[in-house]
Image: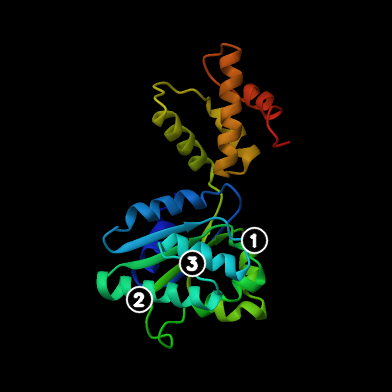
């Protein structure tokens, strides 16, 4: 269900470009990012994941320095130069492309977000020596379309939207999770799966919450399967209503 999104991201990073990944909370953005990491050869790519993005420019650069393994300097300008030098060295000497995944990017302060287009500028825009993958809620796109961030937006080549799954995806997702956990029998009735999708909107993280609550309730009551009535009762044990 997320294969097309993954293929787009792999193609974008392979061509040393930048990407924007958007989706509601729990839609599966992190799942796609894990798959992206597994698809990129460690011999040719270094993927650095950053979730703490609510930082000013100086502390954000410090975080990037730690991620790529260089000693942070005193000033943002010195750290900026060090990051560029390391990315250049990785590309030219080791043929390794640096990829920075910035999660929850909608939370980044304007002063930090607005400076990232400068970090992508190597040798007068002639050398794509790193890739950014900006990950966030759908409002991130609205922020990037503001005039102060237009320079960054025009450097992003690919937009990937992770949408909630349809009923068949919700069913397949639950069955896969159960199979991975060792279940050998069908534990949810068709009606129960329908109610779970209806109540969660197909958001995978929310599906986890409700399906897990329903399983615990069925186990407590010694029921062989989860039916729609169990799901309805389990809903009141979750923060979803």
Image position of 201 (left or right of 14): right
Question: Residue 78: x, y in percent?
Answer: 50, 76
Kindly report which numbered mark, 1 or 2, lies closer to the viewer in this rendering: 2
Image position of 15 (left or right of 18): left
Which is more N-terminal, label 3 or label 1?
Answer: 3
Using the rendered image of the protein, determine whether residue 52 is visible from the camera's viewpoint: yes
Task: Name the secondary structure under disc 2.
Answer: helix
Q: Disc 3 marks which residue?
A: 72
Alpha carbons under labels 1 and 2: distance apart = 29 Å
Q: How crowded is mark 2: few (under 14 residues within 10 Å), some or many (20 or more)?
A: many
Q: Which residue lies furthest to the bottom in this view?
A: 124
* Residue 88: mark in rendering: 2
Kindly report which numbered mark, 1 or 3, lies closer to the viewer in this rendering: 3
Question: Residue 238: x, y in percent?
Answer: 68, 31
Alpha carbons under labels 2 and 3: distance apart = 17 Å
Image position of 133 (left or right of 142): left
Which is more N-terminal, label 2 or label 1?
Answer: 2
Q: Residue furthest top?
A: 222
Question: Residue 72: x, y in percent?
Answer: 49, 67
Kindly report which numbered mark, 2 or 3, lies closer to the viewer in this rendering: 3
Q: In this view, does 62 lie above or below 30?
A: below
Which is more N-terminal, label 3 or label 2?
Answer: 3
Q: Disc 1 marks which residue?
A: 107
């Amino acid at each position: 269900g997320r294969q097309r999104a993954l293929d787009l991201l792999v193609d974008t990073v392979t061509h040393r470009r930048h990407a924007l990944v958007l989706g509601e909370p729990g839609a599966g953005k992190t799942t796609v990012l894990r798959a992206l990491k597994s698809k990129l050869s460690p011999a040719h790519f270094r993927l650095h994941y950053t979730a703490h993005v609510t930082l000013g420019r100086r502390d954000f650069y410090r975080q990037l320095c730690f991620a790529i393994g260089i000693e942070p300097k005193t000033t943002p300008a010195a750290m900026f130069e060090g990051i560029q030098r390391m990315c250049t060295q990785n590309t030219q000497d080791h043929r390794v492309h640096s990829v920075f995944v910035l999660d929850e990017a909608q939370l980044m302060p304007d002063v930090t977000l607005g400076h990232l287009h400068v970090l992508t500028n190597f040798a007068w825009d002639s050398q794509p020596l790193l890739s950014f993958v900006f990950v966030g809620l759908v409002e991130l796109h609205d922020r990037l379309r503001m005039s102060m961030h237009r320079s960054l937006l025009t450097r992003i080549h690919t937009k990937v939207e992770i949408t909630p799954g349809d009923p068949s995806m919700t069913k397949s997702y639950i069955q896969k999770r159960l199979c991975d956990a060792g279940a050998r029998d069908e534990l949810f009735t068709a009606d129960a799966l329908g109610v779970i999708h209806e109540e969660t909107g197909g958001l995978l993280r929310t599906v986890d919450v409700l399906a897990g609550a329903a399983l615990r309730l069925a186990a407590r009551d010694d029921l062989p399967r989860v039916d729609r009535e169990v799901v309805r009762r389990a809903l009141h044990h979750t923060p979803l209503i």
